[in-house]
Amino acid sequence: MFPPLLPESSRNGSWSVSFPNSRVIDHIILRIDFVLDRSDLSWHDTYIRYSLLTLTSEQDWENDNSKLISVEFSASRIEESVGTIHTDFANRNIGGGVLGHGCLQEEILFSIKPECLAARYFSQPLKANQALAISGARQYSRYRGYRDTFEFYGNMETIPESQIVQTRENVPRKMFSTHLTCFDAFQFSTSVRNDKDFKPKEESIGALEQQYQLKNVIRELNKALVAFSVPECNQPISTGWWGCGAFCGDQQLKFVVQWIAASVCGRSMRFHDTKIDSPLIRKGQKMVEMVLRTQRTVRWIFVVLQDYAKALKIRSVEMGLFDFILCFSGGRCK
């Protein structure tokens, strides 16, 4: 069954545009002249491509000897990254609550890049082995805030408006657009609480154990793998805390899962967090540096994940996942 293109309240013949994202989406009308009259460009520059990505065979994670790739940490937003594939932390129904009252990462992306909205019309709910790639959608609007503080913040100017007018025939769509890959995390019901050293608190061990169950880890690995396998594009991946907000995912696990998937795809990863100096990011940077220094593989870190899951099961966890990996890679254990 296809998700509705418009919110329930709008499907009665009298749509009142009053949801939080409406002003951002409406802004495309002011920029529509850029979309029209582009016969001078190839279809690669003028068309938007929507591609359903499907993982057709199981990945042998335990025997994959791909080297773990480099990770760049960035204080910018994902959508501000140039020359990378942007990630959409999607709802399995693409677009989530963008035409309702949702103002989380996916809804914001679909608001500032409203050409993505067309995907809601023809895409069915994503299966566990599927992701959706969108190529060519442009960002028309800037914004500020998040969730309750989200608001339209003006026109998105990739290059100055005056320069666009003067060189209009020489400005291809690709200067304004990116590749976007949409993938949904597994939704857990309980958030994980950590202490100041990012060791899970006793009351969170049960919830964390569920996330580290092999079937759940493999589900997330396969989902990230198919999402990062964007065809005809060799750019790095720009991502962040996928599934770590409303879906209650463990931040350290989700980071490692995406790192593994990017490594199998042979793509370097740019990890975005506006709080780049946070203790967790610093710990992650230290862990990545140590693992790369010792030239570890996907097979190695997958086994470490299983060992951490076993420690959770017998309640013998004395540290978070990043510190656990540091120990196994030759770092100093706490």
Image (spheres, rainbow, N blue to C red):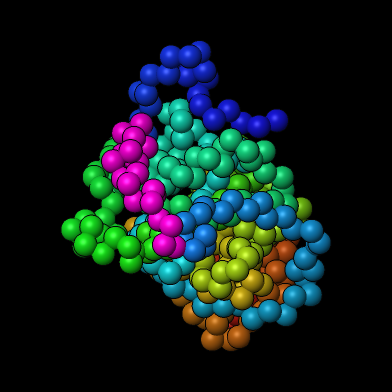
Front residue of 36/207: it is 36
Identity of the residue drawn at 72% across and 45% down: 127
The spot of residue 324 in percent (x, y) is 59, 69
Q: Does the image show residue 212?
A: no
Identity of the residue drawn at 79% across and 68% down: 60
Identity of the residue drawn at 28% across and 41% down: 30
Magenta highlight on residue 36 = yes
The spot of residue 198 in percent (x, y) is 49, 58
The spot of residue 309 in percent (x, y) is 70, 59
Front residue of 49/75: it is 49
Identity of the residue drawn at 43% across and 42% down: 114
Q: Does the image show residue 270?
A: yes
Q: Residue furthest left?
A: 162
- Residue 239 against residue 97 in the figure, above or below: below
Magenta highlight range? 22-41
Front residue of 138/236: it is 138
Left or right: 240 with respect to 329? left
Front residue of 238/47: it is 47
- Residue 96 against residue 197 in the figure, above or below: above
Q: Main secondary structure of the magenta part?
A: helix
The spot of residue 83 in percent (x, y) is 43, 69
User: The N terminus appears in which quarter of the rendering?
Assistant: top right
Magenta highlight on residue 30 = yes
- Residue 41 against residue 266 in the figure, above or below: above
Q: Quadrant of residue 163?
A: bottom left
Image mark count: 0
